[in-house]
Image (spheres, helix red, strand yellow):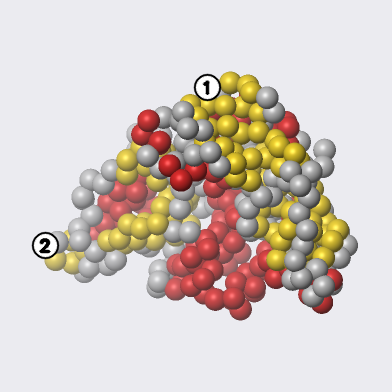
Amino acid sequence: MLQMQSTVTADGHAELAVAEVAEPAPGPAEVLIRVEAAPINPSDLGLLFSGADMTRAEAIEGGVRAEIPAEAQAMIGPRIGRSLPCGNEGAGVVVGAGDDLAAQALLGKTVATWGGAMYSQLKVSRADQCLVLHDGTTPAEGASCFVNPLTVLGMIGTMRLEGHTALAHTAAASNLGQMLQKVCTNEGIPLVNIVRREEHVDLLRGIGATHVVNSSADSFADDLTAALKDTGATLAFDATGGGRLAGQLLASMEAALAGAGAAGNRYGTATHKQVYIYGGLERGPTVLDRAFGMAWGLGGWLLPIFLDRVGPEESEKLRQRVADEIKTTFASSYSKVVSLTGAVSLEAVADYGRMATGEKYLINPQS
């Protein structure tokens, strides 16, 4: 069978290629899935490219190759010489199963799953990691059941667990951002959307957003502070990671709280402000200009850690909600559908490697 693999070479290059590998066999509690759809998410790009600039890639047999910048090479030591299968999530039809009843019950079902190696024609997965899609749901419709939808529900779950009442979100015109807006609208949660282009303001307002601010506008700081004051948001999720945006969020939260008369002292307001970094669209250093008092926090956020935090019972409820709403609230859109070999062409890697809003790829390993 064919499988997409990423390899870091000893001379500091990332190689992405399609390889012929042995067909996997399911264990007793596992199933064999014929993968028919798997998205390329921003969270996949770290494994795919290892920090290499794929706009400067060159063609090799079966794929592409690009140099990894010196500043990224310190992180790749354990990967040198190892060919790793790629793809965090996807969907397909169960064509084989182990002896356990739970595995046997999935034969012939259309399921979504995650856990790596999804850019393969066949994938072995634990039966309890599979989400059975409702009748009439295609693999393409169910391919993005995990990363984006569960991240959205995890953000809202984190908000409630930590006592906040509103959210702010960066890179908000993405598939994930649009899902978040839909859920917040449905549940009456105030949301501040931060985008970089004016057309993205219009896009989000078109699906019901009330607060959308453009970080490219000269009035960004004032607009952000006004939106945070109006919503009372003291929690933000930042997809960019690098640059000054996390610090700007904290500073605007502080200004909004002070403008609303929040209690404080000479160190600033006493209300805790929290920003979680969950992505890396900006790869430079995270810069904080300390203009937000002392009641603040900056941390990382990962979906698996959140799911561990809430436990298996709550996690399963969230998964079932995604399956129920995969054609509505959690529907994903794709700009291109490609084969495995098409996904490792020079044109494709340069395109999806830009992580541009509205340019999401879907791989069909069977095509």
Specify the amino acid type for callout 1. Answer: Arg
Q: Tell whether 259 sits left or right of 162.
A: left
**Secondary structure type for disc 1:** helix
Which quarter shows the C terminus? top right
Q: Quadrant of residue 42?
A: top right
Using the image as rendered, state which of residue 303 and residue 256 is in the foreground.
Answer: 303
- Residue located 82% across and 73% down the image: 99
Q: Are marks 2 and 1 in contact (CB under 8 Å)?
A: no
Q: Tell whether 85 sits left or right of 233.
A: right
- Residue 41 placed where, x, y %? 60, 45
Which quarter shows the N terminus? top right
Q: Residues within 10 Å of mark 2 (few under 14, many from 20)?
A: few
Residue placed under numbered mark 2 in the picture: 266
Q: Tell whether 177 sits left or right of 134.
A: left
- Residue located 46% across and 45% down the image: 78
Q: Quadrant of residue 213?
A: top left
Q: Is residue 57 visible?
A: yes
Using the image as rendered, state which of residue 64 and residue 250 is in the foreground.
Answer: 64
- Residue located 60% across and 72% down the image: 315
Alpha carbons under labels 2 and 1: distance apart: 51 Å
Q: Residues within 10 Å of mark 1 (few under 14, many from 20)?
A: few
Using the image as rendered, state which of residue 257 and residue 327 is in the foreground.
Answer: 327
**Secondary structure type for disc 2:** loop
- Residue located 58% across and 51% down the image: 176
